[in-house]
Image (cartoon, rainbow, N blue to C red):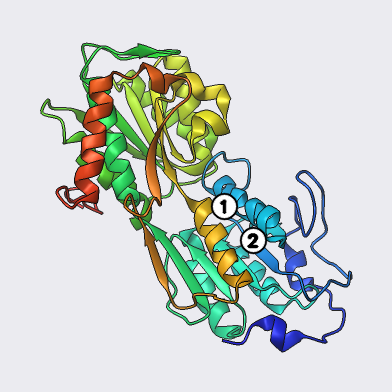
Amino acid sequence: MKSRRAVLTGAGTVSTAALAGCASRLPGVGAGDGDEVSTTTTKQFDDSDTYVGMVYATGGLGDDSFNDMANRGIKRSRVEYGVEYKNEVPESPDDMQDLQSGYAASSNPDFDLAVCVGFLQTDPLKQTAKAHGDQQFMLIDSVVDRDNVANYVFKEHEGSFLVGHLSALLTTQEFAAGAGSTNPDATTVGFVGGIESGLIKKFEAGFRAGVDQVDEPVDVQTAYVGAFDDVEGGKEAAAKMYDDGADVVYHAAGGTGLGVFQAAQERGRFAMGVDSDQSESDPRYANVIPASMVKRVDTAVFQAVGNVVDGAFQGGSVNSLGLAENGVELVYGSPLGDDIPSDVVDAVAASREGIVNGDISVPTTPEGN
């Protein structure tokens, strides 16, 4: 595939007006964190450089989770490859196609890669990729079957299985660490999802299967808030679970999950992080986070950008990353991870090995769905 850089070499200065519909509140091309950068530019750029356009999920940066992991990947690309990048956050899914198309239509700079973060970008990208066949795209968490799209998906159910197993082991014993403790009279855990979708159901399915790995019966409560940026909604959903006896709540809800952590602190219980090690990404809540299910979105972004830099863009590919590929992982929190009993850690490690070697098959949909 001929890159847009080859097609557009020699093009003059063009304003990226299509991007101006959603004003950038985030770092832009070549900018440092916190800088305010206009989406319209008349600056001439060096054609020898590589430019990447980032379109994030609607939860925005600062979610200490999914979007921030993607941002970490492009920051690493800037350091190690010298690429320049621009960040855009849609105010709603309706803005996604305009932002995708804006990168594709831009010639100053002409973007070598447009990274589309999140499954809600799928339908817009089907249209954008078809209309702009010479633009290279990366899609995270879904698949668009076109030669100019490199797709990266994850086996979230595998990592979530480990979280479920750990949560069940903790709720079935007396455990206290940091600001949390379990109730010896209850064996209950919870799951809080963002938007109810096939993707988030994979998290729930793995979590439930992991809970079932223990011999003692454990109740699982589930709630979907309907958004990835509703902190109050996440707090309300988790608080109800804690009040109903849950010792541990796992979230797959982006920025909404911050409310889960707040409820855990207020109720003196535990919450499991997602996408990044949330005991480190937001240490305010480290005293209630025993572990997180890390999803290496940063590695996927870094790999995809590296392929473009090397002239080896993998258009039309579907890259599926699970435990065996180090695409997902359970990471114990700091400082609570050191307090988890060794027999619990060993049991979870055995489950991990069972998944990797094929002895344990993890479902992708919750039982009964």
Whether label 1 touches label 2, CB < 8 Å? yes
Image quarter of residue 223: top left
Can see residue 110? yes
Per the image, label 2 sits on a secondary structure element best described as: strand
Can see residue 88? no
Image quarter of residue 338: top left
On the image, the x and y values in percent for residue 364 come to: 25, 54
156 on left or right of 1: left
Packing grade of label 2 (10 A; few <14, some 14-19, many >=20) is: many
Q: Amino acid at mark 1?
A: Ala
- In the rendered image, the residue lying farthest to the left is 215
Tell me: residue 237, above or below residue 357. above
On the image, the x and y values in percent for residue 47 come to: 79, 76
Q: Which mark is residue 367?
A: none
The residue closer to the viewer here, 207 or 342, is 342
Mark sitting earlier along the chain (1/2): 2
The residue closer to the viewer here, 328 or 325, is 325
Q: Amino acid at mark 2?
A: Met
On the image, the x and y values in percent for residue 27 come to: 75, 51
On the image, the x and y values in percent for residue 357 come to: 20, 51
Identified at 55% across, 47% down, the residue is 69
Identified at 73% across, 50% down, the residue is 26
Tell me: residue 290, above or below residue 137. above
Per the image, label 1 sits on a secondary structure element best described as: helix
Q: How many angstroms separate mark 1 from mark 2 (CA)?
A: 9 Å
86 on left or right of 268: right
Identified at 56% across, 72% down, the residue is 137
177 on left or right of 222: right
Q: Which residue is mark 1?
A: 70
Identified at 40% across, 66% down, the residue is 319
Q: Which residue is mark 2?
A: 54
Image quarter of residue 222: top left
